[in-house]
Image: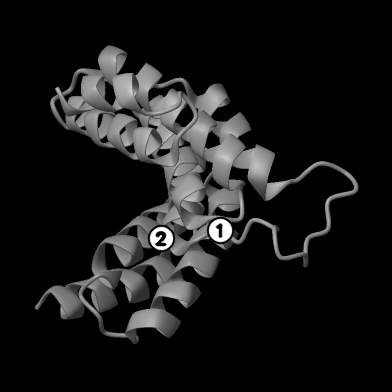
Amino acid sequence: SSLSLREKTLPPEHAALSASLENLGKVYQSQGRLALSEPLLRRSYEISLSTLGMERRETQKRLENLAQLLTQENRLSEARSLYLKVLNPEPGAKPDSKSAFRPSADFLSGFAALLVKEGRYGEALPYYARALKMQESLNGPQHASLAALLESYAYALNKANRQAEANKLSLRARSIRG
């Protein structure tokens, strides 16, 4: 396989190996073969973290992939600790430095979805709000990519007993979907 060839020819901490591990892990995940997927996604993230650092988008995406897999496996506390490791950096970290983690909208909505799965609806809301604001600024307020995020946000609002806000977002999602 491509992965075997890369493992034979590249150093064990090479960024290209990390990409191959990630790709195969995602294939296994899409097939529901989660036990095979996890070690590959974990190793991919660890290689990326050690070689590229957390400031690189590739590393952030690999952490997100691993956290989503753990969420899918209902290993919520493990997934949460991964998310929180970067959302609440170690004391002494410089949040405005070049290497600071700047979460993507997908990362924020993934963490929000984890909180919803744990029944922590109110805590999920600010993460959904930030993700929505980011997506709107990137793609505009009516972009098709917003529909799923709006629906997830509306669900959390509804569960947090904020039905009026939830209804507005649900209507907006429906109008985007057409």
Give the numbered dot on residue 153.
2
| Kind of element beneath mark 2 | helix
- Check the image and report above or below for 119 versus 9: below
Mark 2 Cα within 10 Å, few/some/many (few <14, many 20+)? Answer: many
Camera-side mark, 2 or 1:
1
What x and y, as percent, mark residue 27? 18, 31
Is residue 144 in view?
yes
Q: Name the residue type under label 1.
A: Pro
Q: Is residue 102 above or below residue 26?
A: below
Please state the horizontal and vertical placement of residue 101, each as a whole percent of the image: 64, 56
- Image location (x, y in percent) of residue 22: 32, 35
Structural crowding at the residue carrying mark 1, measured as other residues with C-alpha within 10 Å and reported as few (<14), some (14–19) or many (≥20): some
User: Dividing the picture into quarters, in which one does residue 49 lie?
Assistant: top right
Mark 1 = which residue? 103
* Residue under the point 45% across and 27% down: 11
* Amino acid type shown at disc 2: Tyr
